[in-house]
Amino acid sequence: MSKRKLGIMAGSGTTKQPRHWSLGLLGSMEDPESIVKKTENIVVIRDKYPKAKIHYLILPYEDINSIYKLTEKHISLLEEFGRLYGELKDKHKESSLRAGFHAVPSMQRLHMHVISTDMISPCLKTKVHWNSFTTNYFIPYQDVLKGIKENGGVKKISNEQHKSLMSTELICNQCTFKPKNMPQLKEHLLTHVK
Ligand code: AMP
Ligand code: ZN
């Protein structure tokens, strides 16, 4: 059974104090092995369990729990997220990258995923993994920024929407192929590699 199911605290890495698994990003934000870039307000880290060939997380040092805590006062912070996303796109010109947030994040501290569309990775295992990046569960960066600018915040999805997005039938994110299962999807994804 996984640590998560057992509710066991995960070690924090750099401190002796145990942390709940959902706080794991806080350790990685301080871990030189994970950090790709830091500014005064923001850190870019490598996702520890990447779901594609390229997978980064962009996080603020400010203690913001999720997109649902963002208000108009965070617009400049979010714009800085966008600039760092732009830098990552420049660094990986050969790949197609997307940036966005999970509608119901599992980890604490606001984090924006920057992920390549190949979705090729040994860590991509389940339908939940797949649907969390390829359905509307993945809220694009631009939509979050627009939501904050126009409505002052982001609207939460309902439990029903959550369930329905997670149980969406598998479909390739690069063509119309509908695989029967995850192994077939993963094999199929390789056919899109140039
Ligand atoms: P979510 O909360 O669903 O938006 O996703 C959390 C992301 O954090 C996932 O992509 C995980 O692979 C990643 N992750 C989990 N633990 C860590 C960690 N300790 N350091 C870096 N990334 C992590
Ligand atoms: Zn395809």
Image: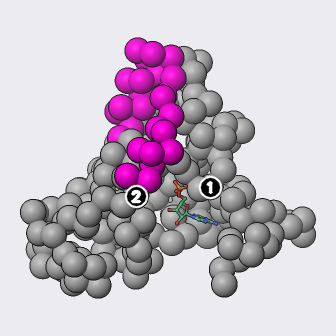
From this viewpoint, which residue is outermost toward the front?
Answer: 160
Toward the viewer: 62 or 147? 147
Residue 61 higher or lower than 17, as above or below: above
Type of residue at label 2?
A: Met
Q: Which mark, residue 107?
A: 1
Q: Quadrant of the N terminus?
A: bottom right
- Mark 1 sits near ligand 1, with its Cβ under 8 Å away: yes
**Residue 96 vs residue 2: left or right?**
left
* Residue bounds of the magenta highlight: 140-164
> Which is closer to the viewer, label 1 or label 2?
2
Q: Classify mark 2: helix, strand or loop.
A: helix
The residue at the point 36 percent across, 31 percent down is 143
Which label was assigned to residue 166? 2
Position of residue 15 measured from the top left corner of the image (x, y, whole percent): 86, 66
Tell me the quarter of the picture where residue 130 sits: bottom left
Counting from the top left corner in percent of width and height, residue 89 is at: 31, 50
Cα separation between marks 1 and 2: 17 Å
Which of the pair 47/88 is nearer the observer? Answer: 47
Position in image of residue 69 (x %, y %): 62, 30
- Taking the image in four quarters, ligand 1 sits in the one at bottom right
- Picture layout, residue 52 above or below residue 140: below
Position of residue 23 relative to residue 190, above or below, is above
Task: State yes or no: residue 141 in magenta.
Answer: yes
Residue 106 in which image quadrant: bottom right
